[in-house]
Amino acid sequence: MEPFYLKNVAKYHSLVNKIGPTLKPRVSTGEAGPNMIVSARIRPLSNDEGFPSAIFPRSNQENVVDIHDLYNHPRGIPILKSFDYQVDRLFNSDSTTEEIYEDLVADLVPFAWDGGIGTLFAYGQTGSGKTFTVSRLEQLVTETLMNGSLKGEREVYMTIIDLAGNAAFDLLNERAPISLLEDSFGARRW
């Protein structure tokens, strides 16, 4: 961890505590849209991270999270920059992947089984827990597809890829590289 942050842990706590309950309320956008649900999972901090969490779910507003980032101002004075985000579903650090599966993914499985296309897109910083979450979701989807609870027989095709910058990897084939190509219109294909 960068020395600036480690040196200013106490200052960070002081600045966050000064904020108190004066945060501006978010106006709810209502229910999630029918075609896409945006969710966030707060990863628990590991013991060796050395800096307090910068993510604060609002206790008085569902699915709203405040992010308080300590900024190293050029003058050397630590400044707190705060942002708030609203998502359709917010999962705290104590939420299980099984809870996330039931809330977000379980309905996609029979939909895909009946010919629809279900997409789960995980996005986030390196080390934020995407692989941890998606790996377990992959197991739960596979269990549902294979446990006989869905009517009829189907051929199942599944693609799980990791896009990292300009590279792509097949997560069902030991992270084998996948070629990224562009068609004549500049659209990427793999």
Image: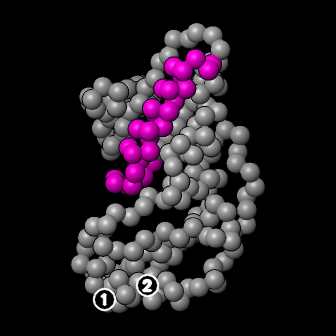
Residue at the left extreme of this rendering? 3
Give me the residue at 51% from left, 49% from top. Answer: 96
The majority secondary structure of the magenta stretch comes to helix
Locate residue 84 relative to residue 135 in the image: left or right.
right
Give me the residue at 54% from left, 21% from top. Answer: 147
Which numbered marker is on residue 148?
none
Q: Can residue 54 be seen by looking at this rendering?
A: yes
Instruction: Give the mark toward the camera: 2 or 1.
Output: 2
Residue at the right extreme of this rendering? 30
Q: Looking at the rendering, which quadrant does residue 3 occupy?
A: bottom left
Seen from the viewer's position, the closer of residues 64 and 151 is: 151
Q: Looking at the rendering, which quadrant does residue 69 occupy?
A: bottom left
Seen from the viewer's position, the closer of residues 36 and 105 is: 105
Which numbered marker is on residue 76?
1
Mark 1, secondary structure of its residue: loop
Separation of residues labelled 2 and 1 (CA atoms): 17 Å
Quadrant placement of the N terminus: bottom left
The residue where tag 2 is placed is 13
Give the mark nearest the N terminus, 2 or 1.
Answer: 2
Q: Please say if 11 is above or below 30.
A: below
Seen from the viewer's position, the closer of residues 11 and 59 is: 59
Tell me the magenta residue range.
Answer: 123-150
Give me the residue at 68% from left, 71% from top. Answer: 60
Q: Please say if 145 is above or below 96.
A: above
Assess disc 2: are there few (<14), some (14-19) or many (≥20) residues with their C-alpha within 10 Å of its C-alpha: few
125 within the magenta span: yes
**Where does residue 25 sit, x and y in percent of width and height?**
69, 74
